[in-house]
Amino acid sequence: MQDFINKMILAAGELTLTYRDRLENITVEHKNDKDIVTEADKAVELFIIKSIHEVYPDHGILGEETGVHSGDSEYRWIIDPIDGTTSFLYGQPFYSISIALEKDGILQHGAVYAPVLNELFQAERGEGATLNGKTIRTSSRETLSKSVLGTGFACIRAGAKRNNLAYLGELLPKIMGVRRFGSAAMDMCYVACGRFDGYWELNLNIYDIAAGQLILQEAGGEVTDFKGNVIKEDCCEIVGANAFIGDELRDVFAIIDNAKD
């Protein structure tokens, strides 16, 4: 299965690069005022779906752009064809293809590929996580004061009343720094390989985080909501962290949430 996923996600990455070579002519649609989808997003998702159905015609699929494709199997694929569409459209390298596979609702495989950077993150349940075939682990930094975190602002694009600004303002004085690249899948993989010590974001969907979640967990990290609960299908907030700073990070979020009550 992993070989199949590898071949498919690498081919999908190559497809994004063909569109990247002609960004000035690419078709762009607006889901809302600040959220876009391009013809590349749609083409890559259809390519992945076709690749899966040719080999596993009974598998279910959830894609960001095309929604639910029902199947008669216990397996379900979760696809984000281009995570970081704005980065992609602006010619920046921080976008990725994210593919996860569940069996009976439990993540079994995850792959996140950043084509411009030529970085393939992978995980299989119980087998650890890798970057371009080499084993990766989360960082060992034990406090927020020594940590660099990643985040994103999907909540701002969505116009959500509950947004990330309060959490960001509370965290900034307590950490070494924050980075924002625009792909939740890549952010979680960056925690998995120690480039970040933690990551948080609101207003996400399961296709944004499914593959990255397994990769981070298999690299020794943890993934919860802001209160420390297991991520569910209708997730909208996420904390990804190494094995040390998760509690401290959630304690900071509790300060904000309790102040709002």
Image (cartoon, rainbow, N blue to C red):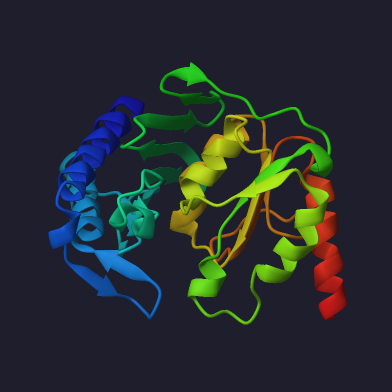
x 69%, y 41%: residue: 148
Image quadrant of residue 257? bottom right
- Give the image location of residue 59, x and y in percent: 30, 49
What is the tally of numbered marks visible in this picture?
0
In this rendered view, identify the residue nearer to me: 149 or 4.
Answer: 149
Image quarter of the N terminus:
top left
Q: Is residue 194 left or right of residue 35?
A: right
- Give the image location of residue 153, x and y in percent: 55, 64
In the rendered image of this protein, does residue 205 appear above or below residue 149?
below
- Give the image location of residue 65, x and y in percent: 30, 64
In this rendered view, identify the residue nearer to me: 85 or 65.
Answer: 85
Residue 102 seen anywhere in this rendered image of the structure: yes
In the rendered image of this protein, does residue 44 appear above or below residue 4?
below
x 44%, y 31%: residue: 122
In this rendered view, identify the residue nearer to me: 157 or 177.
Answer: 177
x 48%, y 43%: residue: 186
Image quarter of the C terminus:
bottom right
x 49%, y 58%: residue: 206
In this rendered view, identify the residue nearer to me: 158 or 44.
Answer: 158
Q: Is residue 223 left or right of residue 42?
A: right
Image quadrant of residue 2? top left
Image quadrant of residue 225? bottom right
